[in-house]
Amino acid sequence: MAWALKLPLADEVIESGLVQDFDASLSGIGQELGAGAYSMSDVLALPIFKQEESSLPPDNENKILPFQYVLCAATSPAVKLHDETLTYLNQGQSYEIRMLDNRKIGELPEINGKLVKSIFRVVFHDRRLQYTEHQQLEGWRWNRPGDRILDIDIPMSVGIIDPRANPTQLNTVEFLWDPSKRTSVFIQVHCISTEFTMRKHGGEKGVPFRVQIDTFKDNENGEYTEHLHSASCQIKVFKPKGADRKQKTDREKMEKRTPHEKEKYQPSYETTILTECSPWPEITYVNNAPSPGFNSSHSSFSIGEGNGSPNHQPEPPPPITDVSPSSNLMLVNLLPTTTPQEAQQWLHRNRFSTFSRLFTNFSGADLLKLTREDVIQICGPADGIRLFNALKGRMVRPRLTIYVCQEPQQLRDQQKHEDGESANSTFFVYHAIYLEELTAVELTEKIAQLFSISSRQISHIYKQGPTGIHVLISDEMIQNFQDESCFVLDTMKAETNDSYHIILK
């Protein structure tokens, strides 16, 4: 405690502070300490808290914070003395957060009679998840289209003005409020902690979140950019009524412990005091990739020497396309010699735009060195497996492949031989059609693409049977086609309109 001698404090203040610290260590009443007991604003850039560090008094111990935020939810009794409190919440349930004006007389007079802005966030507690927050939230958006992570229960809230929720920031809400008036905000958290857990064997523990509040005052231009105060607390979110069961389980576990063991744990408080922290860094993400939940466009296929690819490619290929005959517009393999710029194009083409920012400086060699566990940890289970398969060039075979010839082509090579006779050569050009749904509608669409016409212009598709009869193609018939069957397509004008009949011979 030698550092305490360097503080320019009066003896009375030092003595008072020591008495308060001693009383707090005996009683453990963290609420009476206020938000200043765990000041970390000068310690960490990211809001990651360690109670062991915050137990040391900071240089501004005597500073009274201008605001205090109280979450009306009980803390867990199964938290050790020097650890940060943990609060359990139920998914979708409204919880009150009281916004308290804690200023001394004459402090911050510039906000008297004015409004301040507070931004609420639900963020990750773990540093590893903070680094990939954008990817984690985008994955949640894809799995829960139309839902938000954080909402304000406006009918129950008191004193908030102009509440806003940005559609692109699912975990953030903001509003204006007057510190001189009573203000209570009711929030709802719709994600649960286990949605961001690596699922391996089942029953994994959910990840902890943080509820963080950043408050700002307006500047000369009327913009709320001047930071006043930030505070946060650690939470876990369970399915409805799950938080109540978890709280009961923790309480029962503590009752079974000996009195000596109980001394190592904090008591459960009826409310949760948000502790001071650094302001959350403002990071602007640019993401133009459509989310799968909202992507309703159909796959498009190029008509050429290889029609219909087993892998749908809705975007045109980048300049690094493999033009070898065997590629056939399939998923292009990434090469070790691929530059970071070309790797970005490859990610966009193969629907990994969400992670392009994360892999900005990765070359083809860097990406190919990633293991299956690496990409799953970075991108999550679903996209991680998809990216790993794409990196290794693993192709999914179609359920059925057939070869069709539009028309027999006669090429007469007028080459004069020594005897003065001409030689005739005849060959057939076939196109591959890949079927995955094995339906007549799918076959109609693929043949229409082959003829460069609309599928509506094809009335019926027939298969030529014994004695030349025309059998109408059905789903069941296609399902009984032999793989890699060959057909010659013949077209016949329909009698009533401009459509055609297709005959497979």
Image: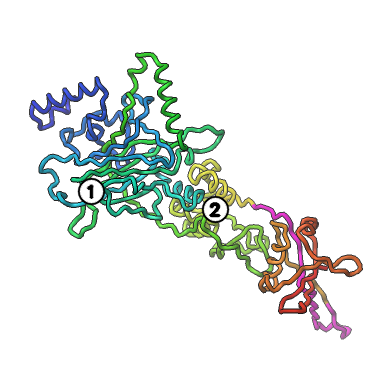
Q: Was residue 409 drawn as part of the magenta stretch in this picture?
A: yes
| Residue 430 place in picture, x, y as percent | 75, 68
The answer to whether residue 443 is above or below residue 135 is: below
Q: Residue at x 31, y 33 (%)?
A: 272
Residue 118 visible in the picture: yes
Marks 2 & 1, CB-CB < 8 Å contact: no
Q: Was residue 168 drawn as part of the magenta stretch in this picture?
A: no
Q: Quadrant of residue 309?
A: bottom right
Range of the magenta residues?
Answer: 395-424
Checking the image for residue 42, the label placed there is none
Q: Residue at x 42, y 21 (%)?
A: 252
SS type, badge 1: strand
| Residue 343 place in picture, x, y as percent | 50, 56
Instruction: Say what amino acid the circle numbered 1 marks.
Output: His
Q: Quadrant of residue 310?
A: bottom right
Judging from the image, the colouring scheme is rainbow
The quadrant of the picture occupied by the N terminus is top left
> Mark 2 = which residue?
336
Kindly give the residue lying farthest to the front in the view shown: 155
Between the residue at mark 2 and the residue at mark 1, the CA separation in whole angstroms equals 47 Å
Checking the image for residue 227, the label placed there is 1
